[in-house]
Image: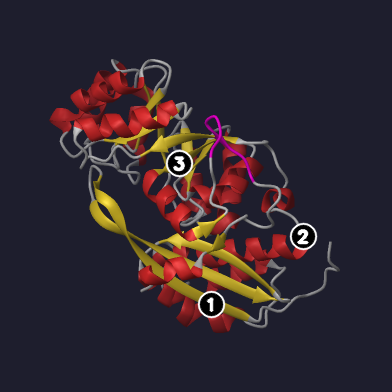
Amino acid sequence: MRDINEVPIEAVVVSAYRVPTATPESDGTLAWDSTTLVFVEIQAAGLCGGGYSYADEATARLVHERFEKLLVGCDALAIAARWRDMRDNVRNLGAAGISAMAISAVDNALWDWKSKFMGVPLVTLLGAAHESICIYGSGGFTSYTDQQLQEQLSGWAREGIRAVKMKVGREPQRDRARVAAARRAIGDDVALFVDANGAYTRKQALLLAQGFADSNVSWFEEPVSSDDLEGLRLLRDRAPAGMNISAGEYGYTPGYFRRMLQAQAVDVLQADATRCFGLTGFLAAAALCEAFHVPLSSHCAPSLHVAATCSAGPAINLEYFFDHVRIERMLFDGACVPSDGVLAADLSRLGLGIELKKEDAECYRI
């Protein structure tokens, strides 16, 4: 352990990397062919903390133009104060969207730096609530053929992952058949989740929920827009027994999560530390879940969320998202690797346990 004094931030460095997808990818409302990683380094006391967000390159510009001068010289140990400084700084820009993702990347880097400064893994600094966290394999894009869908999901099942998720909503008339094909591929012992990314109307979602129940779907994510809290509540009240309604990945602020929970809109709240003001915001979402007696799930960015979910009492699972798993294995030393369907923090590594492989990443740099 080090002596704890005020430690000034010496530099804030941001970079962005655009990585093409392995195949065309789409969900119920969007298609994409690349993913951008925004990576922030905090330098202080001879140490470097790294954090990231999956966001547009405009996020990197905002970090460079707004936060570098703001944070240099400030105490790196006072993460709550730095979080407040950044939120105040973007007041007139709007707190959600790019601003929140920029704050997230910096906040995540500060937590990585602080745990390195303290000489401990991040999960130790935060305080572990779970030794490990269950994962679910996530992909099953609407751009896949039925064969590709079945191969991906059954591959995860063979690896010991006990739950898998597929995208629905682009062709509602085909979704029951696609879901049935997925169930045949994974067998009866693996949980099947579906994610519509808000593609359905309320009535469509109600009808399809009944059809998905025939394939024993136990998780229906964003059946309607996550902004439609009344619609989510309708689905939560009327979905078949045993089918959880989940949403929250587009939540940026603690206030949004509070409104979603007050509306009783979800059975499981999702939060994403690359969007919701970083690990600080994720822990705030966890506290709200504790208060409302609602389970918490992390969205995407698996290597970032291992320590966070293991430290959050209400957390029940972590999304092992295909695209981000691939990128993190390509670009990070220490990227998470599951065992028997769970992830645990590597206690032999300080901080988040990951380091950017800059030479390997350079070819993707924007």
Residues shaded magenta: 338-345
Which quadrant is the C terminus positioned in?
bottom left
User: Residue extending furthest right?
Assistant: 3
Looking at marks 1 and 3 on the same chain, the residue that comes earlier in the sequence is marked by 1
Q: Residues within 10 Å of mark 1 (few under 14, many from 20)?
A: some
Reading the image, the residue beneath label 1 is 13
Query: Residue 338 appears at what percent x and percent y?
Result: 54, 38
Mark 1 or mark 2: which comes first in sequence?
Answer: 1
Task: Give the tally of numbered discs.
Answer: 3
Q: Which residue is more in the foreground, 171 or 180?
A: 180
Horizontal relation, residue 256 to residue 78: left or right = left
Q: Position of residue 141 (x, y in %)?
A: 27, 41
Say which residue appears at 68% left-offset and 48% top-offset: 123
Say if the magenta span includes residue 59.
no
Circles 1 and 3: CB atoms closer than 8 Å: no
Say the numbered circle drawn on residue 119. 2
Q: Nearer the viewer, residue 191 or 249?
A: 191
Measured from the top left, where is residue 203 in percent x and y? 21, 29
Q: Which mark is residue 339?
A: none
Q: Say which residue appears at 22% left-offset and 27% top-offset.
A: 178
Q: CA distance from mark 3 to mark 2?
A: 28 Å
Taking 38 as reference, is 270 above or below it? above
Task: Please report whichever mark, 3 or 2, sits nearer to the chain's N-terminal start.
Answer: 2
* Quarter of the rendering containing residue 222: top left
Secondary structure mostly seen in magenta is loop
- Residue 246 percent across, percent down from the top left: 41, 35
- Residue marked by disc 3: 320
